[in-house]
Amino acid sequence: YTQLMIRYGFEDAAREVQTLYLDGRQREAAAALPDALIDAVCLCGPADRVRARIAEYRAAGVNILGITPLGADIETRLAQLGILAELAA
């Protein structure tokens, strides 16, 4: 993941996150992930923002997205997929 972050242009943050993680400070490592990186690789935020990001991908020619919904149980993950399907329609 460190090399991927570096290729995305977040070299300094990648090194900091790696150092924190390897030092056993996983929560600090997670907190050190730059918002810009998360925004670059995730569809998250208010519905209008996610809808706009999907439209940007569509305009760029993307027609398949790999989706990994997060949640404590299957019902939560399925609900997230339903919301995403509505936003993508």
Image (cartoon, rainbow, N blue to C red):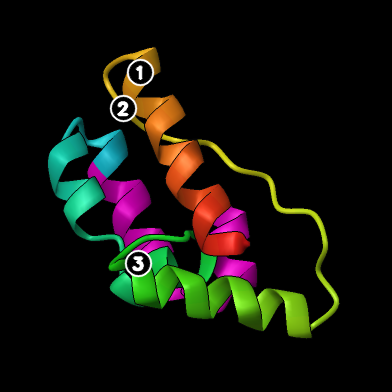
Amino acid at pointer 1: Glu
- What residue is shown at x 20% (from left), y 30% (from top)? 24
The residue beneath circle 1 is 75
Earlier-in-chain disc, 1 versus 3: 3
Q: Mark 2 highlights which residue?
A: 71
- Residues under labels 1 and 3: Cα distance? 19 Å
Task: Tell me where residue 29 appears, x and y as whole percent.
Answer: 23, 48
- Gap between marks 3 and 2 measured at Cα: 17 Å
Kindly identify which residue carries mark 3. Answer: 47
Q: Nearer the viewer, mark 2 or mark 1?
A: 1
Mark 3 / mark 2, whichever is N-terminal: 3
Task: Looking at the picture, tell me which residue is in the foreground, 30 or 14.
Answer: 30
Q: Amino acid at mark 3?
A: Ala
Task: Tell me where residue 46 sits by quadrant.
Answer: bottom left
- Magenta span: chief secondary structure: helix
Q: Secondary structure at mark 2?
A: loop
Element type at marker 1?
A: helix
What SS does tag 3 mark? helix
Which residue is at a point 39% across and 76% down the rendered structure image? 49
Magenta segment includes 57: no
Q: Marks 1 and 2: in contact by CB < 8 Å?
A: yes
Crowding at dot 1, Cα within 10 Å, few <14 / some 14-19 / many 20+, comes out as few
Mark 2: give few (<14), some (14-19) or many (20+) Cα within 10 Å: few
